[in-house]
Image (spheres, coloured by chain):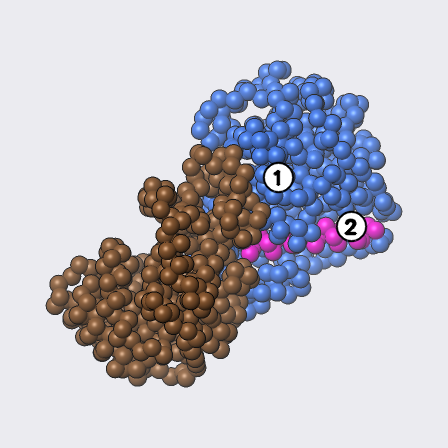
Chain colours: A brown, B blue
Amino acid sequence: MIEFVVQKTDVGSDARVGTLTTAHGSIETPAFMPVGSLGAVKGIEPDDLRALGYGLILNNAYHLYLRPGHEVVAAMGGLHAFTSWPGAILTDSGGFQVFSLSKLCKVTDEGVTFQSHLDGSSHHITPERAIEIQEALGADIMMAFDECVALPSSRERIQDALKRTHQWAARCQAARRRTDQALFGIVQGGHDPELRAQAAAGIVALGFDGYAIGGLSVGEEKSVMYGMLNATVPHLPRDRPRYLMGVGMPEDLIEGAARGVDMFDCVVPTRHGRTGSLFTSTGRMVIKHAQYVRDEQPIDPACSCRVCARYSRAYLHHLFLAKEMLGVRLNTLHNLHYFAELMRGIRAAIAGGTFADFRSAFYACRMHHHADEAEASASLQARSEEVRL
Amino acid sequence: MIEFVVQKTDVGSDARVGTLTTAHGSIETPAFMPVGSLGAVKGIEPDDLRALGYGLILNNAYHLYLRPGHEVVAAMGGLHAFTSWPGAILTDSGGFQVFSLSKLCKVTDEGVTFQSHLDGSSHHITPERAIEIQEALGADIMMAFDECVALPSSRERIQDALKRTHQWAARCQAARRRTDQALFGIVQGGHDPELRAQAAAGIVALGFDGYAIGGLSVGEEKSVMYGMLNATVPHLPRDRPRYLMGVGMPEDLIEGAARGVDMFDCVVPTRHGRTGSLFTSTGRMVIKHAQYVRDEQPIDPACSCRVCARYSRAYLHHLFLAKEMLGVRLNTLHNLHYFAELMRGIRAAIAGGTFADFRSAFYACRMHHHADEAEASASLQARSEEVRL
C-alpha cells in the first residue's frame, strides 16, 4: 500500500517534511499533485512530468468513469498502463464532480443519482460503486466518496451531509476488494470550526491510510480557509499524510504546509497556463499584455525551467495572441515547474530549519505586484471559457 | 547563402539525393519541411523537431507579417531567435495566402491589395515589399512573390498571371538588400504542360538559388499533378534544389522524388494529426473509430517513434474523443516521425540503388487499405472545422 514517514517537523510552525512511499515510487512531502482529469495533464506528457520532478498526480474518477469508462481502463491494465504514467496516482472519488459538474443531482442515504455533463445519461453512484470504480482504475491512493454541500448552507444541512459522509466513509471501507491500494478519508464540515473538529474526530475514528480536508477553496476568504485548517489539522494523526483537496495558489501551499498539510492538488498551474497567467518569483504575469510584444526576457529571469531557458516573453505573447497550442504547452510547463520548485523550496526550508524566513521572503517578493495579481485573476476568468483544449 | 550538392542520381528515375547546406545546418535531400505558419509547428517544440530529425522548416511570411509583424520579429533578432529554432528556415512569400486566405484581393501589375483575414485591415504587398518582409523575418531561404490563379482558369488568364509572376520575380531579385539569404523562383503555369515548360524557362533565365513548382495540389487529380512535374522538372537546372510547394501525401513525396524534386512542404502530417488521421506503414488509421477503444497496440507496431513506444491506440482514441490537447501533440509527433522516416527511406533507397523496389513496396503495403484511406479523408474534412488549436 503506502508508507508515510515524517522526517522532520518545523519548530516555529506545524510544517513537516516526510516521505510517502507507494508501489510507484517515493514522493517527498509536502507535495503538489498536478491534475490530469481525463487521464492526461492537459498538453503534458508523463516524461515532462518526470523531468519536472513530479512523482504523484491526480486523476478524476468521475471523468474517467464517464469516458472511457473504468472497465475500459481496467481492461487496459489500469491507469498507470493506460496513461503510461510510471509514477504514483491518486484518484478522487468523484464526489466533488458529481455535485459540481453533473445535472439533476439527487442525494439519498443510499447514494447519488445524477445526469452526465457529457450526454445527459443517468448514473447512480453509491460509496460501494465509487470504490468499485476506483479499484478498477487502480490508483495508488483512492478517496472515500463524500457529500459536498454548496456553501453557505445552514448548520443543519452541513451536519446532515457530515453524518452521511461518515456513513459513506465506513461503507467505502467495507466495500474494498483490493488490498494494494490506500484509501483516504475526507473531513468536511463547511466553514464551521466546531463541525470541522467533529468531522475530523469522526473520520479519524474510522481509521484511514491518510486524511483529506475537503470542501475548501470554494470561494471563501483565504482567512476562512486557513481558519478551517487550524480547526482541523490538530485533530488528525501525526503519522498519517494530510491532504488539502483542490488547493491552490502558491500562498495557499505555503500556508497549508505551515499548518501541517502534506499533499495538495489543484488545476491552478495548468489552467492558469492555458489562460496565459504565469507564475514568477515576484508574482503573476499576464502574458497577453502589450508590454511584452518586444520583450526578449524569459518569463522569469530567476527561473531555471526549460521554457525560460529557451523562449522569450515576446514569443509567448505572440503564441498566446495567435492561440497557438504550443503556447499553452509552454505556459503550462513553466507553471508546473514553478509549483514543483516552490514545493522543493518549502521542503528544503522545513528540513533546514529556515521555513519562517522562506515564508517571509515569499511575501516580501510579491509586495509590489498586487495590481498585476488582480488583473491576472480577471484575465483567468475571462479566458477560461474561451480556451477549451 | 546556400550550397547544394547532388550526391547521387537514381538509374531508373529522375530521383536524386543531395545535401543542402545553409548557415543553420545541412539538410539531406529529398527533404520534407514541417509547416510552422505562425512561427510554431502546432503543439511541437524545436527540440521535438530536432529529435525527429528535421533540419529545415517553413514559416509563413503572410501570417507573420500580419501578426506579430515582421518588424517585431526583426527586432527580436529574426525568426531563428524569435522562435528558438536553431535549424534552417524557408519563408514562403505570402503569395499563396494572399490569394487563398485574404478578402477582397485586388491585383495590378504593381502588386496586390487585400484585407487581412484577421481583422479586415487593408494591406498592399508588392514584390519589393514581400522581399522587405522576408528579409526582416530573416529565413535562410526566401521565395519570390508570385500570382496564384484559381484553377481552372482560361489559358489567357494563366498566361497573364505568368507574365506578371515573371516581372515580379525580377523585381524581387532587384529589391534584395541582404546577401546572406537565398531566393527561390517559382514556376507556375496551371495544368498546362506547355505553359509549365515556358514558365520554367522564363524563371530559370532569371537565375535563382533554387526553383519551386507552385500552384499544384490544389484539388487536381494526382495524375495531373504528376504530369505537371514531368512537364516542369526537366527544364530546371540539375545543380539547383527543386521544391514542390504545398505537397503532400506520402505517395506524392515518393512520386515527386522520383521526378527529381528535392524539397517538399505540407500541413498534412500536422493537420492530419490534429484531426486524428494517423499515418502507418500500411496506410492511414482513423483513431476515433470504436474499434480502438480497447486496443493495446501502438499506432503502428512497425513504427519506431516515441509515441508508438509509449502509448496505445486505446489511450490515443480516448484522448481524441475527450478532445485532450495531449492527443493532438502525440498524433502530430507520430505523423511527423512517419514523414521524417519516409524521407529517410526515400534517400536511403536512392543512395543504395533500390528506389524502384522501395516505391513498389510502398504501394504493395497499402493495397488492402484503400477503404480506410477514403474514410480518413472524410474524417479530416469533417474535423478540420472543429479542432482549431
Magenta region includes residue A253: no
SS at mark 2?
Answer: helix
* Disc number lying in front (1 or 2): 1
Foreground residue, A343 or B279?
A343
Tell me what residue is drawn at x 30 percent, y 82 percent: A207
Visible in this render: residue A285? yes
The residue carrying mark 2 is: B347
Which chain does the residue under circle 1 lie in?
Answer: B
Q: Which comes before the other along the chain, label 1 or label 2?
A: 1
Q: Which residues are magenta?
A: B329-351
Kindly identify the residue that appears in the image at 38 percent across and 50 percent down. A364
Residue B388 at x, y percent in the picture: 47, 44
Residue B81's disc is: 1
Q: Secondary structure at mark 1?
A: helix
Kindly tell me whether residue A325 is visible in this rendering. no
Alpha carbon distance from label 1 to label 2: 30 Å
Q: Amino acid at mark 2?
A: Arg
